[in-house]
Image (cartoon, grey):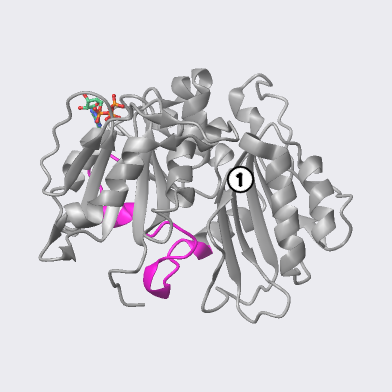
Amino acid sequence: MPKTETTPIPVTLLTGFLGSGKTTLLNRLVRQPDMNRTLVIINEFGEIGLDHRLFSATDETEVVALESGCLCCTIRGDLARTLRDAPWRYAREGRRQFDRVVIETTGLADPAPILHTLMTEPRLVGQYRLDGIVTTVDAVHGSATLDHHPEALKQAAVADRLLLTKADLAPLEALAALARRLAEINPGAGQRQVVQGEIEASALTGLGLMGEDGTRPDLARWIDAYAQPPSLAGLAFSAGPTAAGPLLTPVGSDASDPARDPNRHDDRIRAHCFTLDAPIELGRLEAWLELMTALMGENMLRIKGILNLAGRERPTVIHGVQHIFHPPVELDAWPDEDRRSRLVFITRDIPRESLESVLVAVT
Ligand SMILES: Nc1nc2c(ncn2[C@@H]2O[C@H](COP(=O)(O)OP(=O)(O)OP(=O)(O)O)[C@@H](O)[C@H]2O)c(=O)[nH]1
């Protein structure tokens, strides 16, 4: 698909705990020619210096709660305005000067409200689309941060790509242990080690299940990550016999490792993968997703799926953060011979049985 002024602009959300290396990363990135047409928005208080032609800082002093009072949907006023105005503010002779956006969030931010702003704010929907969430995790302090800060855990759980920063400072074993732990929390996110922010800009883009120009760089890898039985001890897939009948095949095994600390925050976060053999009726799927997200609320962190919808030759991709979904997208073709629907839910404090009991309704 050729890029036009009406094609939604892809947005990368860069998140990560305080001091985990986001600014270092951005400062290196903006020197790359690939970033010339990227608008960088830093959603941060205080002084920030970033030497980039297309740079904007927002000041999140305005927080508007929705009528529903749902805090996870809190609209980020200034950021929404910045995004809304950017196409004409950063324009020359009537032509937009950027075709990609990177938003760096504050280290303590829950990324969900920003994502919701992107996906629900009427003046932004259609103009922008979420390309992916990149989360930096400090290789030295990351493990302790995950232990003590649930917001850091959430940032890791919703990521499409995890960057293990300060890899130069961490002993190899610690780095490997952190990588394993992150793979438990979020098996579908690709991991990269980074030293002093050195990484090619392309590693932060095209992370959605559906990329630009019909390409799907991460789809096959994403499917593989969930389709293989877990090889790591304690990988957080659930499984076992299911009450949902023969159409619903759980993937992986609920490895209960006696050595695990039952109080670890990580144990509250689970990636649940389901495979559905038969095509799904669209109406039933919609009703089910609505029910599921209403019931699970904020504890449904991320949903991704490639679906075989009844009556459609091609697969449909769905992609949601908490209870907000991107419009489903039909891909050009299936990535392989497998025509089963595959759905992944990254949840907090939601037992698999709850997902199953609602999922049965769709099959
Ligand atoms: N040795 C080493 N230091 C790093 C690396 N990446 C970042 N740092 C240092 O870590 C500190 C924090 O990095 P920042 O880039 O400011 O982190 P941040 O995530 O933007 O921090 P906040 O804005 O406070 O959330 C700085 O002193 C950096 O120089 C790295 O790969 N190796």
Classify the position of the C terminus by image quarter: bottom right
Q: Nearer the viewer, residue 183 or 90?
A: 90
What secondary structure is marked by label 1?
Answer: loop
Image coordinates of residue 233 in percent, x first then y, are 64, 37
In the image, taking residue 256 as reference, residue 166 lies left or right, namely left
In the image, taking residue 44 as reference, residue 358 lies left or right, namely right
In the image, taking residue 29 as reference, residue 183 lies left or right, namely right
Give the quadrant of residue 288.
bottom right
Query: Please, which residue is most extreme toward the front here?
Result: 67
Image coordinates of residue 59 in percent, x first then y, are 28, 30
Classify the position of the N terminus by image quarter: bottom left
**Residue shown at the point (39%, 53%) measured from the top left:** 124
Q: Which contiguous range is marked in magenta?
A: 194-220
Q: Nearer the viewer, residue 239 or 117?
A: 117
Where 313 falls versus 94 (above or below)?
Answer: below
**Residue shown at the point (78%, 70%) measured from the top left:** 278
Q: Which residue is mark 1?
A: 323
Ligand 1 is found in which quarter of the picture?
Answer: top left
Camera sees residue 318:
yes
Q: Nearer the viewer, residue 47 or 191?
A: 47
Q: Is residue 324 magenta?
A: no
Image coordinates of residue 68 in percent, x first then y, are 60, 35
Give the quadrant of residue 55.
top left
Q: Is residue 197 magenta?
A: yes
**Residue shown at the point (49%, 27%) measured from the top left:** 151
